[in-house]
Amino acid sequence: MEATSTRPVRVAIVGAGPSGLYAADALTQQTDVPVSVDILDRLPVPFGLVRYGVAPDHLSLRGVKNTLEQVLSHERVRFLGAVELGSTLTVEQLLRHYDAAILTYGASSDRHLGIPGEELPGSIAATDLVNWYCGHPDAVREQVEPALQDVRAAVVVGVGNVAVDVTRVLAKTGAELEHTEMPQHVLDLLEKTGITDVHVLGRRSAVHASWTTKELRELGALDDVDVVVDPAEVDLPVPTDRLAARNLAVLQEFAARTPAGKGRRIHFHFCSRPVAITGAERVAAVEVERTEVDETGAARGTGETWTLPAQLVVRSVGYRGLGLDGVPYDASRGVVPSEEGRVLADGAPLSGLYVAGWIKRGPTGIVGTNKKDAAETVRSLLADVPGLPGAAEPEPAAVTALLDRSGQPYVELSGWQAIDAAELALGASRGRARTTIHEREALLRAARGGQPAAG
């Protein structure tokens, strides 16, 4: 695309989570190439995993959305929510209206355990549970809420930060969650759960866990929880990795505690993996196999098994990105193949198509990791500008006209601001800072309070 003074380079960013917003920020903060940016998201609201993935009781981390929201207000940025690529808008249409597009739609699917009984009622993915307690519009309430009924013991499979978040939320009292932005029906149900024990399974040793020390330490400070660790499982040499060493020290401190007879308990089990989930009509128990770590660092079964009675199993063994029609996809890794952010087809870059975030690198890192990742992609895009073919219909009005013709309502910045105000008002009516509106139609109704109905 030849440099032109008649119009800016038009860029579409697909996904309004941290990766997409950091990419928009990098584009608009540079001054070498004039740009205009549309941020599209299939949800009516922005912020992605900051809103729907970060645990609701981690208010300081969720507060990063206040910084990200400033990106949406930039004069060269436009937000278009409730626009789903592949449905409302195809990739082909996208590239007709924009000079370049950056895909940042993340990794929303979960990985399976691949064991017998995994599909029993009461066995759910951490992604589904997190969606539910964060108030995601796509949360499968009819699956999650029955799974939480009549539960005394829960098993969480995995030793990452999502597993710690799930464990903490299940173990907390209602009073400890009241200050969060959770939807009211979530708070009401969590208040009524009869969970007394949460078992956390890690297939490798304690030093291989991937959680952060701060999140691990939080578990030992819960009001009504004893943390139970077998001293033999953490009697290990101090690892050279600093994070692993800090985590091991926390676990050893947990192991040295004398249980205080509190109402709930969190049990850690290392070198343990589930091999079957049993039950007649729903989950009743988990068969666990003892493992050992081989010379390569992999876990292998020893044949020694034992049974954990449980009525709920939450698998937290990783997120996985999904493919998109018209875009190359590496099914083995669950990512869009790329090099420095340029999408690759048969090893060669596709002109005008870029990728950032989890769908680029896989589900790794923390929220801040996405800033550096997005900056790399933006550098590649800006370097490619002279060679881009240019959009056939680059006018902003052409995109909204297309959306209007589709009859699908979409949400602009004023609509999001109306949703924001509605959630604050709903929270205030219940003595809370905010209550998340969780239903898609309710979000769209709230949005229409701040903008004309589109379509």
Image (cartoon, rainbow, N blue to C red):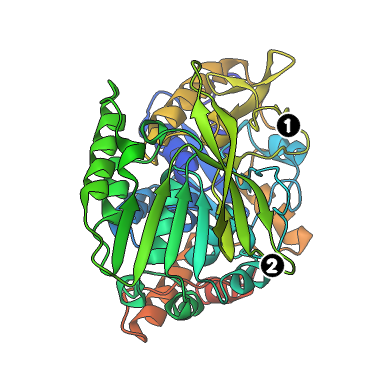
User: Amino acid under label 1?
Assistant: Val
Secondary element type, mark 1: loop
Residue position for label 1: 327
Q: Say whether disc 2 or disc 1 marks the residue closer to the N-terminus.
A: 2
Residue drawn at (64%, 59%) of the image:
123
Per the rendering, the mark at residue 412 is: none
Res 225 seen here: yes
Residue 27's quadrant in the figure?
Answer: top left
Percent coordinates x, y for residue 435 in the rendering: 42, 74
Vertical side of 322 occupied by 182: above or below: below
Label 1 environment density (alpha carbons within 10 Å; few <14, some 14–19, many ≥20) = some
- Which of the 4 image quarters holds residue 148? bottom right
Residues 77 and 125: in front is 125
The residue that appears at 69% across and 67% down in the rendered structure is 282
Residue 192 lies left or right of residue 334; in this view the side is: left
Mark 2 vs mark 1, CA separation in Å: 39 Å
Mark 2 or 1: in front is 2
User: Could you say which quadrant of the image residue 441 lies in?
Assistant: bottom right
| Mark 2 lies on residue | 282
Q: Residue at x 49, y 16 (%)?
A: 295
Image quadrant holding the N terminus, namely top right
Residue 187 percent across, percent down from the top left: 44, 76
For residue 421, side relative to residue 113 (left or right): left
